Image (cartoon, grey):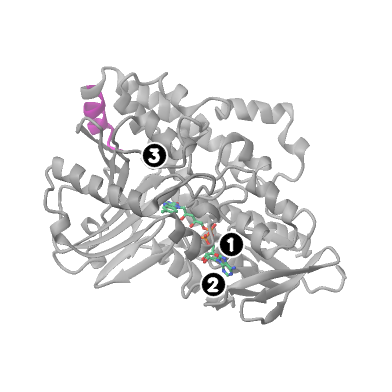
Amino acid sequence: MQNTINKSQVIIIGAGIGGIATAARLARRGMQVTVLEKNEQPGGRLGCMSLDGYTFDTGATLFMMPELYARTFADLGERMQDHLDLRRIDPTYHLTFPDDSQLQLTSDMQQMRGRLEAIETGSFERMLHYLGDAGRIYDLSMPKMLGRDFRSLPEFINPRMLQVFLRVKALTRHTDYIRRFFKDPRLQMAFTFQDMYMGLSPYDSPATYSLMQYTELADGLWYPMGGMYRVTEVLTGIAEKLGVHFIYNAPVEKILVGDGVATGVQLADGRVLPAGTVVANADLGYVYRNLLPDAAAADRIDRKEYGCSTIMFYWGLDKQYPQLGPHNLFLNGDYRLSFEEIFKHTGMPDEPNFYIHAPVRLDSSMAPAGHDTWYVAVPVGHINKKISQDWPGLQAHARDFILQRLARLGLPDVEAHIRTEVSFVPQDWQERYNLPYGSTHGLSHKLTQMAYLRPHNRHSRYHNLYFVGASTHPGTGVPTVLISAALAANRILEDAGR
Ligand SMILES: Cc1cc2nc3c(=O)[nH]c(=O)nc-3n(C[C@H](O)[C@H](O)[C@H](O)COP(=O)(O)OP(=O)(O)OC[C@H]3O[C@@H](n4cnc5c(N)ncnc54)[C@H](O)[C@@H]3O)c2cc1C
């Protein structure tokens, strides 16, 4: 059977950024690719919503590691600058600490020196040291861990790789590591909170993720005019130009398998579509549990650890708030306990941290004139059926807390100016995109779920079934998923003898 199937006939389940990028790569190499997406539009967690004149990016808002995006465009025969109008964001973040003091992070080292030294003497030089080390971690992790297709355990566990783990600080906890550089808790927070983007607590994550602080300040944090959703739109357009056929409102119900190969898919409406190659971009845990027959394999994935979720508020406001920057982070309560509540107890702290993305100060097209568009994210634990979780109660508490916190900081009238409001709780993430436990970042990126130890891009039994996306190797975040697409596509092409 394996010899008779036409591997060039490809079906991809899901038009997330991983599915789109894989599709475009395969179509460029002459394969016939159909993408089936359950929703009415592409993008998945790189999504967008337009309401009453307000445009909201619904998931990803931070464009970082631009060279990884650029590489995808280049591999598709395109130039990123012909498609995306990127603007550098500086200051990168407006941070507000629990004691109401504030710090703006910037790539302008003169300004950074003044800001850091005002908090802790000597901290600027130590930050340079920290970022220098983080740059070396970034340069080493990219080829040796993130961008590498590990195919066997000995490729991963060997003396050379042990050296790599040590050099990328994979065996050191990030919060322990940061204490070597800064005494002031605010600086410790300012250079570790980004671990949440990987769905991780900095108290559990390896210091390897200091590479994120490096890349944000060294390579920059960027904004594509029109919003992050432009990335979805332009890559979908390029894929279509290369011949990819996208079918929306087409939920897949089953991956058809037989004789050790995947033979196609069955849609929820009963249609059967044959394929010689099947790529699952829908989240991996969902695919094992719902689309494949092997319950034991699904149980094995289930025993892995998932990252956190978020409660979201998308607010269209009939007033602008120049006090906010494009990316604002409000850290509240006890830093350590806030992560314990989210990651150990799968709950939400009484005084939750929150992030506001306010793109209008970069891009007036995101709201009617004089109005503001806010994306407010509150990290929370994922759905946990073993305990009772009162999501409507937590959602109401988070909303009140945010409004009160902003009032204390000099913005007392926000609620009165909310004209349009949409809110998500973890169940919404689960239902919209089939994300297990509503985990917005998929499988966690702790040490034992990284590199070779993360689910691979090819199924171990069905060798023409591939996985791409946040819960596979190398992991979550748009640039990382773009690497996942490159690895999956290369493997597919290799297996097809192309
Ligand atoms: C709130 C939030 C904030 C984030 N912030 C950032 C950020 O600032 N920067 C950054 O780089 N990354 C960020 N991320 C992470 C990033 O958005 C994701 O890692 C990335 O978009 C995941 O892409 P994917 O292709 O793996 O999966 P998905 O986006 O989940 O795509 C999978 C697709 O499969 C579809 N699907 C599921 N089941 C089926 C089925 N049965 N049949 C057909 N289709 C199906 C889904 O509808 C979806 O469209 C954020 C994510 C979230 C949720």
Mark 2 CB within 8 Å of ligand 1: yes
Q: Residue at x 56, y 63 (%)?
A: 21
Mark 2 residue type: Lys
Mark 1 CB within 8 Å of ligand 1: yes
The earlier-in-sequence mark between 2 and 1 is: 2
**Residue 10 % position (x, y):** 69, 72
The residue to which callout 2 is attached is 38
The earlier-in-sequence mark between 3 and 1 is: 3
Q: Residue at x 11, y 53 (%)?
A: 413
Mark 3 residue type: Ala
**Residue 496 % position (x, y):** 77, 65
Q: Secondary structure at mark 2?
A: loop
Magenta region: which residues?
107-117
As displayed, is residue 322 above or below residue 174? below
Q: Nearer the viewer, residue 446 or 395?
A: 395
Q: Is residue 113 magenta?
A: yes
